[in-house]
Amino acid sequence: MSADNVEVPVRMKALRAHERGGPEVVVFEDAPVPALRGDDEVLVRVGAASITFDELTWPETWASGGVDRTPIIPSHEFAGVVVAVGSAVTGFVVGDRVFGLAPFDRDGAAAEYVAVPSFALAHLSDGVTGITAAAAVLPALTAMEAVDEHLAIAEGQRLLVRGGAGGVGAFVVQFAARLGVQVMATSRSDSAVARLKELGADAVLVGDEPESIETASYDAAIDTVGAGTPEWLYRGVRAGGRLITLQEPPSDELAAKCGVDARFFVVRTDPAALTRLGELLAAGDLEVAVAATFPLAEGRAAYESRGHATAPGKIVLLPSA
């Protein structure tokens, strides 16, 4: 490690799970501070860590290469300050404010410290709070990759977004609108209509089975809600148009029936995309919603809060609170 590294304790507080399960298996306890696995890694003192409720159901959370990883530390989206760097790291130094996305098959950031490869980090402007950055990382990177690479959508074309008010959906609406795409978003609540239009949606349909979707009336569509993409989303896309799913692969049967090019992807940690996101956050060009914050010690309650938030946005843990 670099000679500039600061003294770091050997123990820390963390959220861990010693067996597979939901929020009920998450405990707040002492744990070892993670060691750097290689010369290209960075140790970060975590200031904020955002949670994704479904991560406790992901296979990668619990095993890597077929090997059980328990006890695991969840939460892969974070912001903090660099406290140690490997000898091969050139882009970061101790004291840098950073944010990033820890690989899904290793321990996350629901802890006082997290160790990650340097490619999983980007610099964070002093004008952006750690809470904002941690809340943006995963949904914004997913939306950015979907719009830039997978949806095959261009200025003037029409995009249908299922779940536009959700974490990823809100960023899809923003990125697509910036491209000059005509965005139709769906929402389960009337209360989200005004916000979606402020984000850039040209129109909003309320309800999860919108009857007014015309067959083959959109150039592309994306399901940001979850598993079980409904048939109406396939029907709404023109023949040869693109449909993207995020939670599970699409139905080959429905794709063939509707003549749609349906695809699934898992977001990758891309340093260029992280840097771009950091620039957009610094410029104030994205709205980032935070539903609530919890001290790290109340991490189980944070995971149990799913479905109870009174405001849109991510749940963020604060290890220093």
Image (cartoon, rainbow, N blue to C red):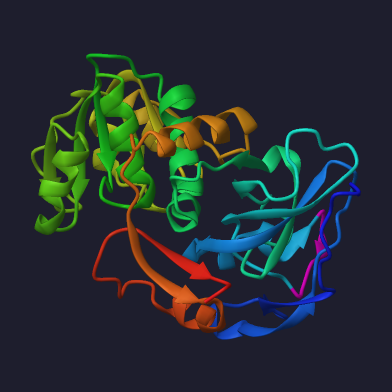
Instruction: Name which residue lies at 22% across and 14% down.
Output: 156
Q: Would you say 212 lies left or right of 220 here?
A: left
Instruction: Name which residue lies at 25% across and 33% down.
Output: 160
Magenta span contains residue 1: no
Asked whether residue 219 appears in the rendered view, the answer is yes
Percent across and percent down for residue 128 are 44, 47
Quadrant hosting residue 310 = bottom left
Quadrant hosting residue 161 = top left
Viewer-proximal residue, 185 or 241? Answer: 185
Percent across and percent down for residue 216 are 21, 24
Which secondary structure dominates the residues rendered in magenta?
loop
Q: Would you say 1 lies left or right of 170 here?
A: right
Asked whether residue 206 appears in the rendered view, the answer is no
- In magenta, the rendered stretch is 65-71
Instruction: Name which residue lies at 31% across and 52% down.
Output: 166
Instruction: Name which residue lies at 35% across and 19% down.
Output: 153
Viewer-proximal residue, 178 or 261? Answer: 178
Relative to 51, say whether 182 is above or below.
above
Percent across and percent down for residue 45 are 68, 61
Viewer-proximal residue, 254 or 108? Answer: 108
Relative to 23, say whether 37 is above or below.
above
Relative to 93, say whether 191 is above or below.
below
Percent across and percent down for residue 159 are 26, 28
